Amino acid sequence: MFDFPKNLEIGYQLSRLMDGWVDWVVINFDPLFRAINAGVLALLVPLEKFLMGEPLSYGWPQWLSMPWWLVIGVTVYIAWRTAGRNIAILTTVLFLLLAILGLFDFAMQTLAITFTATLIAIAIGLPIGIFGAKSDKMDAISRPILDAMQTMPSFVYLVPAIMLFGLGKTPAVMATVIYAIPPLIRLTNLGIRQVDKEVVEAAIAFGSTSRQLLTKVQLPMAKPTIMAGINQCIMMALAMVVICSMIGAKGLGIEVMNGIARLEVGRGFLGGLGIVMMAIMIDRITQSVGKSRESKVT
Amino acid sequence: MFDFPKNLEIGYQLSRLMDGWVDWVVINFDPLFRAINAGVLALLVPLEKFLMGEPLSYGWPQWLSMPWWLVIGVTVYIAWRTAGRNIAILTTVLFLLLAILGLFDFAMQTLAITFTATLIAIAIGLPIGIFGAKSDKMDAISRPILDAMQTMPSFVYLVPAIMLFGLGKTPAVMATVIYAIPPLIRLTNLGIRQVDKEVVEAAIAFGSTSRQLLTKVQLPMAKPTIMAGINQCIMMALAMVVICSMIGAKGLGIEVMNGIARLEVGRGFLGGLGIVMMAIMIDRITQSVGKSRESKVT
Amino acid sequence: EAAKPTIKFADQQFESQWINNAIAKFVIENGYGNPVETIETTTPIMQASLTKGDMHVNMEMWEQNIIEWHDESIAAGTLENLGATYEGGPQFFMVPQAFADEHGIKTIDDMKKPAVKKALADPEDKAKGLFMNCVIGWQCAEINRAKLVTYGLVPDHYNIISPGSSGAMEAALAGPQKKGQGVFGYYWAPTAIMGMYDWYVIEEPAYNKPCWDEVGKSRDDKTYIAKEACAYETLPINKGVWSGLKDLDSDIYTLLSKMNVGLQPINKTAAWAVDNEIAGEWEKAAVYYLKNNENIWTTWMPDANAKKVKDALAAK
Amino acid sequence: MAVESAPDIRISVRNLWKLFGNNDKALLQEDWVKTASKAEIQEKTGHVIAMREVSFEVAVGKVFVVMGLSGSGKSTLVRALNRLVEPSDGIIEIDGEDILQYDNEQIIAFRRKKIGMVFQHYGLLPHKNVIDNVAYGLEVQGMEQLERHKIASEILDKVGLSSWEYSYPYQLSGGMQQRVGIARALALDPEIMLMDEPFSGLDPLIRREMQDELITLQAQVQKTIVFITHDLDEALKLGDHIAIMRDGAIIQQGTAEEIVTKPADGYVKEFVRDISKTKVLKVGSIMKKPKATIQESQSPAEALQIMKSEGLDYTFVVAETGELLGALNLAQVESAVEKGFETSNRAINKSCPRVLKYTLIDDVIPLVAKQNTPVAVVNDHGILLGEIEQSSVLSSIASS
Amino acid sequence: MAVESAPDIRISVRNLWKLFGNNDKALLQEDWVKTASKAEIQEKTGHVIAMREVSFEVAVGKVFVVMGLSGSGKSTLVRALNRLVEPSDGIIEIDGEDILQYDNEQIIAFRRKKIGMVFQHYGLLPHKNVIDNVAYGLEVQGMEQLERHKIASEILDKVGLSSWEYSYPYQLSGGMQQRVGIARALALDPEIMLMDEPFSGLDPLIRREMQDELITLQAQVQKTIVFITHDLDEALKLGDHIAIMRDGAIIQQGTAEEIVTKPADGYVKEFVRDISKTKVLKVGSIMKKPKATIQESQSPAEALQIMKSEGLDYTFVVAETGELLGALNLAQVESAVEKGFETSNRAINKSCPRVLKYTLIDDVIPLVAKQNTPVAVVNDHGILLGEIEQSSVLSSIASS
Ligand SMILES: Nc1ncnc2c1ncn2[C@@H]1O[C@H](COP(=O)(O)OP(=O)(O)OP(=O)(O)O)[C@@H](O)[C@H]1O
Ligand SMILES: Nc1ncnc2c1ncn2[C@@H]1O[C@H](COP(=O)(O)OP(=O)(O)OP(=O)(O)O)[C@@H](O)[C@H]1O
Ligand SMILES: [Mg+2]
Ligand SMILES: [Mg+2]
């Protein structure tokens, strides 16, 4: 009846245009991206070595590193203090399972990346979330962008990321940050907006400046929600583990890739199980950090 | 100091065992999975043809199909009725964009799969969620399983899924359901648990049976939260589009894959943008279905 | 003739396969009247599907990379190898041509030069260079490692990094080329990336069987170091088909078993495709190939079918 | 101490206990629990005691008011009456049947027929309109829409919401929502109504209005009502009987008068401190015996002598039966003596004001204020019981 | 009608308007808005009117109570006083300065020094302990922890929470939390306290206790208080002045007595209906002129004659200045005549009870109840103004 208004030429030109932009960025901003790369690695590489029990730098004595049992011990201790006995036991069991299955080193690589990505996400996402809570306009603008970040398939931005950073951990961290930051921003925003209006009024009524209001009232009170955002952020980061491994970031994803490439379903599954165990462990610990406060407050 | 308690033999045996299970299931349950496959396709194929403006069956007249402008028209009408003028305009613009960029057919294929997967997820997830809300034990058991479903990399279960269902739309739908069902179950559970205790008490006090309580009170009142679960479910399903395309389900993911494989970032990006547009469209419409009730109620 | 079965081709998302699939599709659809479907996929999915008949044909199996599966499947009777699609895809180590010129790289030993290493430094471990391996899980990844160890590049001079997909591998190679920087990796031809940029293929000792057996031992046992290493054998790129294809349509089976497109013509076609920006319309490349290589493709089929193909070509 | 239910007792609760927790029944077997404090039980067992040996009876058609501070167990008590809360121990007899023995079907039938409930926050179904909310109890019984809407419609008329049938709860003010809540309970025409702080959330003006309406309604429908409030004035206004709870136990129950005049302990005393006694006390409680009365048969001269000797200038004349016939003042007696009447009877003022013993003091104040003489207090048969004066009324006001 | 602020006026509000919406100031330029109803404005413009031409003054040290139903604009009004709500139009002068002209820094300084606020739901910081909550206003001023804790500690002492300093709000009962809220406001030692329904959420017993404490505290600290409530008794108990709001406008303001005796309209009348008048009315409002008085210079015989002719058996003796010297009853006069005293003065009962004109009726009831004779009403200088009798007190009670 009507003809389809398809105009492939437009699509083609558009995609060429974008290719051009990407090339332009890749070629012209190399120093910038090198610097970013160096920055991320400066954080990530020592962390990874530390977790894997390697000396942080050549020539350092071995005892300046962290043996596997100490990593487990410290984590279990943290779990115990923040989340109670049950979670501590769960953590121990899962850790030992990881170790027995020979996934410990992979898990530590994954942990290092996840941790770094989360740190960067917090450093970027928290201010954006706060700003979004204060400004409805900012909120309206950021909403579709966050939607896009979450639904845009990561494959799409992996290629430019690899061109910019080369294979390795940095593009993995970047892709993870892009994918994992939206819930943190959203929940920070929500958390601050949800702070009891009367308490905010009280703080203003007693002469808080807006900065004092933020640091002394809104952030502390939004903490449970923000912690939930961080928790979500970590969970989403863990969902990127396989993709990270695809672009050279090592970790548990390697096992999955290897298993799949060889059609060894079981091996892939074990690798996947490793990721699941890490996720459950981290989830339970971070969740209870948020909750313990919340349950006290309400 | 201590030795690593790694026991690769265990891991190896375990993975072999699992390989064996998968083989056993593949071989022995073939008829079952054939039947499932047929069922899914019986739903999906006509839907896809319908959306793409093809006659539902060979020999049917062309006018028994839905031309592209009618698909757009109907969707925009739905958007307008449920979500108001702004969203309707947004929907129109996004649809026309999809059409102009030549992504309309791909989008309809993706829509068909997403829709089918969501339907199946609702059919399975709603009862599970309801049951979880009634039974704390069920809730405790299902929680780690849902965690695992969300964090287990989909690559891991794709291969067994293909072995079971063969290549094509069915394993794509299955993988999508596995990945997308947890938020639906969680939010259904939460929604029912959150229903105002006093209203539930009132319904009981006036002599409701537990079935009446569920259908006349809890489900209608949990609707906003359940709708949010469905919304999340659809969003997660859209996150699987590229992976679906990898296993023969066609759709927008193909554009992404092709773009990436040829290092045509722009093309991949346009494909990804198609997914994002679909996501925003569906998100806004389904979200307002949930919200319009909610804002009335509270 | 709607009754003819659809023939399903695997599309693993690389250029030479796209061209070959397009050629086969054109020939089959126009010459034989079977519908043809190409299924976009990844290697593991292809493996799981081809032996079940969800896909029928893979025009480029690269079975060395998945040799265990290949051999097992042939033995199990689920897969057939229908012989070469073209004579051989070379596999090699390479650096950008400009980089090779700048640093005077000729042989694999030149890669140990401190200046080269420094230019290729691994950002995570600045003391060493970085080598871009092939996809995780493919045999070539282990072979490359074995060779580099024997050449003395690993672990003292280079770290190895492995991408998880061919797309990532290409991006990792293309990025430095765009920036005019160095990169050291493994690749093969014919491929788009080889057409797009100038590469220098690093000289290695020539292929010989005893050497390759040594490499093979090291490939399978990480702890073993091969006594010698050498360049890849140039192996034919074979067609793999589902063992049920013969029963499904024996004419197509016969066609495919005869189909050999030839390395040079394919390379030319690929170059033409790049020059003409065909934007994913691989049929154009197929038509270009068929128009220019009639002498080759007419040998694949009976005259009656060839006539139909010619008619279709004439209409283009 | 099982009390045999008298025929007109609708609700009889005996020794009801409730411990919130998983092990409540077993715990109640342990002796120390029966006497331990709430805090002690909670600390030792993690169980919260919400009802402790609660016993009371409510007669047909009466309003039983339960009061107490937040957390004292009022809601638990009222919810136990329709088994929204499962008591840990004790007996609840409704019309002589122990509802704690009911199985699931019986309890549902019981809830559908016998007992309605009104909630503090209304507990309306937000997704149903007003008429469907009111008809909900009928709907779950399987009644046809036409029929149940007819009934609901009538009830909505009664509570003055007939034009709001198709509105949704969120469109109504709090007072209107609570009217829907009451209508919903009335729609089932139950014998018993449970009302858990039904007016607590309302503005004071609207609250008073609702109380007045409830009183009017109750005059028509005569339900047996258990009413929770923590407002004293509300309790006095509505309640026939009042029970005061603390920490799960009923520490005192009785009429308002009993509680105000004889508070069981300091807590109750504090509770009723602000109450205006004249709204609680009856005339009978402040009347005095007249110094002297005149028999109708006595002559004016005798009367004059009695009055002089007692220093009275106003006195009452009674029949032999003790019935009040009228009053005499000094002037009247003197003129009667002058006129030579044989009996005082002829001189008396027969229309002298009199009040019944059971009248609230508050209600006689206008009369007493106008009257410079004492006012006679009589019983239902007109027998003179005593007299009240301005000063005694003022004293009763002053002592509150 | 700008009123020049008298020196002892602390808060002066003139013609304050508030429309909630984005276009409030512009809208107020349109004439029709000034007279349109709330519903009309909302329908036509989407703006909600919350204050309409509000004007009032509060003198130093006084308690100004604002009453009204939910949504009448009470909270908006009180929040405007420290600019938590930005008025659309009008003037707010605090100690003569128009605070609406303050810039951001000035308003913060003003909030830190001059004005404290107490919230209905306490508005405590849940993540800070009690002492840090109380010290919050000092903390934001940059005071050192040691110093501010010292001050907070003293205040907590004053409100009786000294042993709870390191507890968290969630560990406290509602009444205790509100004490923290009050302490927090007092810690700044502000001249003005804004209290928005501070006791509405509390149980009645605790609520009364808090009111009493506030009265005690106010006697010590003498703040200027704006107090919101919708409880009439609370308003009477605490307020020097009362304003009643409806739909954003103050429909009446004045003393409790003025409002109770001369309600501006039916709404106010309904509002104060339940009030016990004796708690509002002063003795002066029900006193009568004595039929006759005796001058101290008059002789007993003259006095006797006056009393006989007026039919009095009890009367007051005054000096020439009008000052009350004492009372005489018939018996006393007669015996004075017998004894031949020259002046009535010698016979009088100098200790006869007297009450001040400004005493609440409620407070004299015990006295009047005991007294069979009229009670004298005098002013501050002892001048006899009138007398009250039991009957007049009872009439005033009856008419409420
Ligand atoms: N479901 C429950 N689980 C545990 N404890 C409960 C539960 N319901 C009530 N309680 C406890 O039982 C005690 C009595 O509660 P109840 O609700 O009956 O008090 P109330 O007198 O109705 O108070 P309010 O005036 O606040 O409504 C309280 O200590 C309360 O904490
Ligand atoms: N932020 C706001 N935005 C829009 N309208 C508001 C806002 N705050 C209050 N209002 C409206 O202004 C009017 C007055 O509200 P306000 O809160 O001052 O009433 P109130 O007398 O304090 O009532 P309550 O007794 O319920 O506290 C109401 O109609 C209310 O809906
Ligand atoms: Mg209660
Ligand atoms: Mg308010």
Image: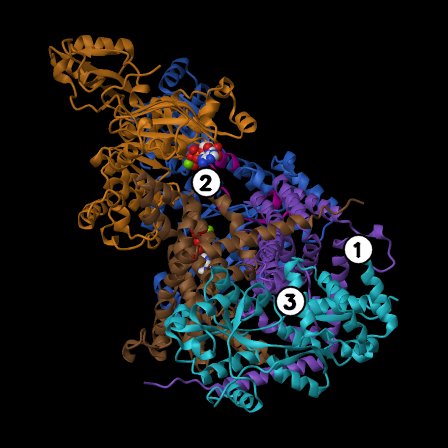
Chain colours: A brown, B purple, C cyan, D blue, E orange
Callout 3, which amino acid?
Answer: Glu
Q: Residue at x 43, y 84 (%)?
A: B6
* Along the line of sight, the residue nearer the viewer: E49 or D154: E49
- Could you give the CA–CA distance between mark 2 and mark 3, rounded to whole angstroms? 86 Å
Quadrant of the rendered image containing residue D107: bottom right
For ligand 4, the image quadrant comes to: top left
Residue receiving disc 2 = D234
Callout 1, which amino acid?
Answer: Glu
Q: Is residue D5 left or right of residue C160?
A: right
Quadrant of the rendered image containing residue C278: bottom right
Secondary element type, mark 1: loop
In magenta segment, residue D205:
yes
Callout 2, which amino acid?
Answer: Glu
- Could you give the CA–CA distance between mark 1 and mark 3, rounded to whole angstroms? 31 Å
Q: Is residue D75 left or right of residue E227?
A: right
- Which subunit holds the residue at mark 3? C
* Along the line of sight, the residue nearer the viewer: E283 or A75: A75
Magenta stretch, residue numbers:
D181-210
Same chain, labels 2 and 3:
no
| Residue C84, numbered label | none
Residue receiving disc 3 = C15
Residue receiving disc 1 = B54
- Which subunit holds the residue at mark 2? D
Q: Residue at x 53, y 29 (%)?
A: E42
Q: Is residue B91 visible?
A: yes
Query: Tags 2 and 1 in contact by the CB under 8 Å rule?
Result: no
Mark in the foreground, 2 or 1? 1
> Callout 1: few (<14), some (14-19), or many (20+) C-alpha neighbours within 10 Å?
many
> Callout 3: few (<14), some (14-19), or many (20+) C-alpha neighbours within 10 Å?
many
Q: Quadrant of the N terminus of chain E?
A: top left
Q: List x then y, in percent, for residue C35.
A: 80, 66
Q: Is residue C247 left or right of residue B176?
A: right
